[in-house]
Image: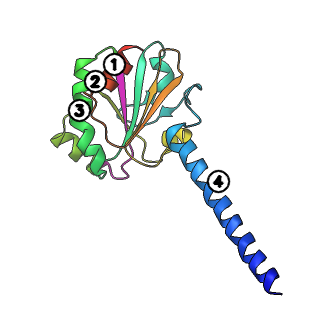
Amino acid sequence: MKIMKMSSKFFAIQIAALLALLLSATGCNYTNHPALIGSAAPDFTVNDPSNPVHLANYRGKVVLVNFWASWCGPCVEEWPSMVALQERMPQITILAIDQDDNISDYTGFLETHPPGKMVLSRDAGFHAADLYGTHQFPETFVVDRNGIVRRKFIGAQDWSSPEILDFLSKL
């Protein structure tokens, strides 16, 4: 009986370890090797009445699809370097897709944080974000000229970093 209790404890520990390993592996796949990398970027139309955006209209250009919100601290943190990137590399289109529910939060943010030449639109219903499987902001997807997702950036970035500028200049 004692041996049976020990072996069932050992078995439970093995199962728990296996589950932990499987969960960590799926997490790594999500963050480091997202399923979209190397695949066609999901096409979307954001039906913001003030500025509807259709991703397919940008085929032939390198596009950064940035999902953000005014209430997101890291989004606010990266905003100035993203605006500067658009100025520095006008051959790239930055589609900044806002996720705010309240339009006054969105417009208030833009009054204090000018967007420069980035293309802005709102997607309060998360339709485009759902297609990309993202709800952690900011997240930015790099789409090449052929419409293929080449990279995903999670969290605030310094868009002036040499590594990012080198990567984008090679697209």
In the drawing, does residue 164 fall left or right of residue 147? left
- Type of the residue with mark 2: Pro
Cα gap from disc 2 to disc 4, whole angstroms? 35 Å
Is there any visible trace of residue 70 in the rendered image? no
Which residue appears farthest toward the left when viewing the image? 112
Cα gap from disc 3 to disc 2, whole angstroms? 13 Å
Label 1 or label 4, whichever lies nearer to me, is 4
- Type of the residue with mark 4: Leu
**Which residue bears the numbered disc 4?**
22
**Which residue bears the numbered disc 2?**
162
Q: Which residues are magenta?
A: 92-103
First in sequence: mark 2 or mark 4?
4
**Which residue bears the numbered disc 1?**
166
Q: Which mark is residue 81?
A: 3
> Under tag 2, what secondary structure?
helix
- The quarter of the picture where the C terminus appears is top left
Cα gap from disc 1 to disc 3, whole angstroms? 15 Å
In the drawing, does residue 49 fall left or right of residue 131? left
Q: How many marks?
A: 4
Label 2: how many Cα within 10 Å (few below 14, some 14–19, many 20+): few
In the drawing, does residue 109 fall left or right of residue 136? left
- Type of the residue with mark 1: Asp
